[in-house]
Amino acid sequence: MAGIRDISVYLPLYRVERRSIAGAWGKELAGVRPVANFDEDAITMASAALSRLDFKGRSINMLYFASPQMPYRGMLNAGILAQVLGLPPDAVVEDGSACGRGATLALRDAARALKSGETAGALVVTAEVPRARPGSEEEQDAADAAAAVDLDRGPGMAELIGTASCRSDLLEKWLPAGREFSSGSDARFAARYGFEQPCVEAVQAVLRQAGISPEDVQWAAVAAPNLRQYRAVLKKLALRPQVSLEQVYTGVGSCGAAMPLLLLYQALRQAAPGDVILVGGFSGGVDALLFRVTGDVLGFQAGKSFLEQETKMLIDYVELLKRKRIIPMEELAPEASPVLSWREREEILHLSGQRCTVCSAIQFPRRRICWKCRAKDSFVDFPLERTGRVYTFTADYLYPNPFGATIMAVIDVTGGGRLYTQMADCSRDDVHIGVPVELCLRRLHQGGEFNNYFWKARPLSEPGGEKE
Amino acid sequence: MSDGEVAIIGMGCTRFTDHFNKSYGDLVVEAAFEAMDDAGVGLDDLQAAWLGTCYAYDYNIEGNAGSSLAEPLNLFPIPVSRVANYCATGIDAIRNAAFAVASGQYDLVLVVGVEKMRDVPPRGSLVAVHAERTHPVLAKGRTAPGMFGLMAQRYAHVYGDVKQYMAMVAVKNHYNGSLNPKAHFQKALTMEEVLAAPLAADPIGILDCTPTSDGAAAVILTRKSLAGKFTRDYVLIKGIGLAVTSGYFTAQFDQNWDFLGFSSTREAARQAYRQAGISDPGREIDVAEVHDCFTITEILNYEDLGFCKRGGGAAFVAGGHSGLEGKLPVNTSGGLQACGHPIGASGVRMVVDVGSQLLGRAGKRQVKGNPATGLAHALGGPGSVSAVAVLGLPVKGGRK
């Protein structure tokens, strides 16, 4: 057996008005789309999604990370996330498929490992930070999002009761190596043979497998190229219309690999015990997964969903192009060393300091001699909490930054320790002494020709923060 | 070192400004010879030398070792050491030279503080050092004004809005600088101009900041017992303290720091006051040069040096006490605000300016009432190191 214990969604704070994009090209569109900040990438967004799961105390030894925008080729991207989470070196850590089926394929693989007993707990995380060609239709609908699922061998709040897949074997959307923007084939051709046909095959197969008829599927969390095709394929399959799930299409947009998980999250928010949820992911074919909801789902349904989260500042099209680095800009490339980054990885990626075993003083960064009692090498690990409050700050206009003032803050970390770091997702007016913050992983710069990730402080709207 | 053991018998200083047409070596020669001429000594008389330059190779190829001082002056083959301790470099170079003289190992030594920062654009010097070098992620985003912006925000949070008091420091020091032919900026500023200036690191505006400058300053040291041989005009080093209280990259991670002042200044001052026998600095110090890299820093320095109580810094400047006519004139030279801050040179310049006040040579900026005890204070790193020197006059002899 394999089931979902928890699921989380991370949407960036900022939104762009589609009117601003379309207006640059002489068109008219309405609505907003989430846009990642300039210091976010697939890894930082995946980290944000993972931080919104609560798996403290559980032994997780499997992590799948799937994103079409993996920062690195030729290297294990998921390894960075494993370090952030503090997974042991022998955990199964894997980069999944870098396409729209990345999350659904990873769910299948994780479920297989759980059922076979290879592992007792697994995480699947996905992130989409697409860069679309300016002026393209893709650009109008592209949305930045990340999502994560925590699975184990119990039924959890949704037990996996069937999986099926069907390939499409045609070119619908692809990004050749060395090219900057994706290419696409004829929209109607891709819709019919690239999505609808394999979707019908896969869904009918999984329903047969589980012995369930279409009218007994309460929720169809099926990712489709757009809203029109979503409605059309549900009709074709005789599945009931999904008015509430349509809000993910209209309120968020097309977020590729993350889409099935955003839809699944929304379904679980509203599902009743006993409901059946169909999940579908597509790209070069379709994966269909079937879940049965249990009584545990009721504990998942409190608080705000990602569709209701606070959004800040609508940015304009030029700002979008800057953040996606479609407009080239001069950026700092500070000195960096892979050796130093490895030696200090506990602090840098896991935010771990130490506690002195002689006098209990907390040390961050780590050191050999206690700053308080001078005891030598007498420490135990002390990972800092990921929340705190601003003790003091400033907005720096001198530090080279094409995106405006750099806000630096001294943070009193909850439970002990102090962090001095940049603030994220805010302007000068959002900050004052005492503001509660969450610590989030961001890409500070690309000095040394690699991504230097570290933790920034992001204002929370209320103490303790909102968890999606 | 015990009080009065070491004497400063010669002092020299170049103009501080962008000396595009002068090399590092040119600045060394100019300052050193002014000091040697003041002491009536020549190159052949120097037995050892100390060089204070903070950063070598960051914006200039000279300054990494004693050769950068020995070569332009042809001091070969005497021992020359380079000292570096962030902005406390200059006073620390004097401190090390003073120990050598006090020990009896050398009778006559030269100290030169020099920094040549303007062979690159201002952004290419200190901002680049912080942004492009230093730790790749810890404190990344920090700049010099940024460090003090943190202090000003916290100070305002605890004691009330401080920006207008910062502006008073700028106005005072730029006025003093307008009377100082060696200052980088020699133009008085108004409160309105300072308050309206664009921000560097909120609430610090660009007219609350010291400029980037080139310059050198020099002193000649001997023992008190030998000083009279050279000149009637000399001052004594009554005490020098130095304190290191944090790391450079991790200073702002210190859980014990209230960001309302600097323990390094307090500790360095404690050492210097003990050596000099000072128990009430607010009354016993007659004139002072303090580290005003940013205007907020001067306000904090008044408190850390004991010129006033904690939290009383804003009122101290507002009451005119640190003005030229006040009870404890501070930065009569114009301070770092008007003189500029060639890092390694500043501490030595401060000692020269304090010495000049005690010897009655400060011209239009002369503090009245025969000042007899003066103080020089430097604050380095983000406050991780500080040096304080107390100067006094010999009991007999004294000033022209």
Image (spheres, rainbow, N blue to C red):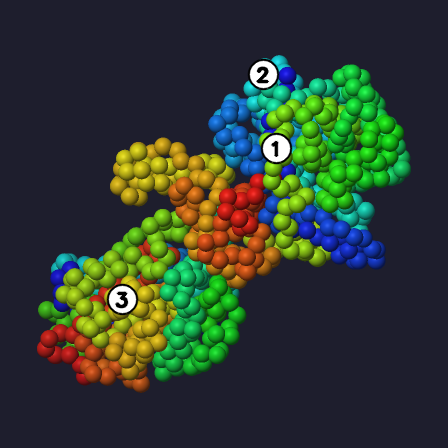
Is residue B108 toward the left or the right of residue A101 in the image? left
Q: Pinpoint the chain carrying mark 1.
A: A
Is residue B321 toward the left or the right of residue B340 in the image? left
Q: Crowdedness of circle 1 by 10 Å Cα count: few (<14), some, many (20+)?
A: some
Q: CA distance from mark 1 to mark 2?
A: 27 Å
Question: Residue at 69% of width from left, 31% of height from top?
Answer: A271
Q: Residue B85 is drawn in which quadrant?
A: bottom left
Q: How far from the left and from the top, in percent, is residue A281?
A: 75, 30
Q: Nearer the viewer, residue A4 or B2?
A: A4
Q: Amino acid at mark 3?
A: Lys
Q: Crowdedness of circle 2 by 10 Å Cα count: few (<14), some, many (20+)?
A: few
Question: Residue at 16% of width from left, 66% of height from top?
Answer: B279
Q: Residue B165 is drawn in which quadrant?
A: bottom left
Is residue A228 toward the left or the right of residue A431 in the image? right
Are discs 2 and 3 less than 8 Å apart at CB?
A: no
Question: Residue at 16% of width from left, 67% of height from top?
Answer: B278
Mark drawn on residue A118: 2
Q: How far from the left and from the top, in percent, is residue B308?
A: 27, 69
Residue lying farthest to the bottom in this orientation: B364
Q: Pinpoint the chain carrying mark 2.
A: A
Residue B143 seen by the camera:
no
Q: CA distance from mark 3 to mark 1?
A: 56 Å
Are discs 1 and 2 less than 8 Å apart at CB?
A: no
Residue B92 vertical placement versus B176 (above, below): above
Mark drawn on residue A103: none
Front tag of 2 and 3:
3
The residue where tag 3 is placed is B309
